[in-house]
Amino acid sequence: MTQIKIFTSLLLLGFSFSAVNAEDSVSSIRTFTHFDEQKAFNLIKKIFRSHSIEKYIIDTSWEELHITERSASGYFNLNTTINHLVLRVEKTMDHNHSIMHLELYKTSDADEVKHYVPVNEFSHELLWNRLEYGLGLNTQWIDCFTLSGFLSFEYPLCAIAKESLQP
């Protein structure tokens, strides 16, 4: 009987560990001290609006910024693909820190599954870099013409001029 309890406990522990790892793999997280999330949201909105105001749908609330880009392909069988950028903010219990979660994913008419951009991809680091640079929290600017980001030069985070984000 104790073997069954031990096995069940290990099994449940394994499921909870995999659930934590699954969450970690779909969103990147940054913690900021005394942080104005609305200023951060406005900075990201500025980047996407300056690239193409008609191309992106921007939806925002006090705790979340959601930017979508729709594209269609096909002739007879039209398929719509939507790229999503979601920034969510949580305040800590002491209200001195803000935890930001970034999720990048794609949805399509072909399936209803969210296809997440892995956290270790260039896009996650690039967004955090632009945000921290624009808020004056980081003086480093990631160049999009590095090997990992070479194909992303049309992406709004690469198209924005460094001077336009200086605090």
Image: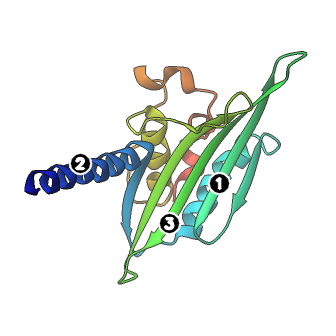
Q: Quadrant of the N terminus?
A: bottom left
Q: Nearer the viewer, residue 79 or 11?
A: 11
Q: Nearer the viewer, residue 33 or 79?
A: 79
Position of 66 with respect to 74 (left or right) is left
What is the residue that sits farthest to the left in this orientation? 2
Q: Residues within 10 Å of mark 3 (few under 14, many from 20)?
A: many
Which amino acid type corresponds to the residue marked 1 in the rendered image?
A: His
Q: Earlier in the sequence, mark 3 or mark 2?
A: 2
Circle 3 residue: 89
Mark 1 vs mark 2: in front: 2
How many numbered callouts?
3
Q: Position of residue 45 (x, y in %)?
A: 66, 54
Q: Nearer the viewer, residue 107 or 94?
A: 107
Who's the residue at 33% across and 52% down the image? Answer: 20
Label disc, if present, on residue 66 of the rendered structure = 1
Which amino acid type corresponds to the residue marked 3 in the rendered image?
A: Val
- Depicted 21 relative to depicted 36: above or below: above
- Depicted 157 relative to depicted 60: above or below: above
Mark 1: secondary structure? strand
Does the image show residue 146? no
Q: Position of residue 162 (x, y in %)?
A: 53, 43
Mark 2: secondary structure? helix
Who's the residue at 15% across and 52% down the image? Answer: 4
Q: Residues within 10 Å of mark 1 (few under 14, many from 20)?
A: some
Q: How is the image coloured?
A: rainbow
Mark 3 vs mark 2: in front: 2
Q: Position of residue 135 (x, y in %)?
A: 48, 60
The quarter of the displayed image where residue 115 is located: top right
Circle 2 residue: 11
Q: Earlier in the sequence, mark 1 or mark 2?
A: 2
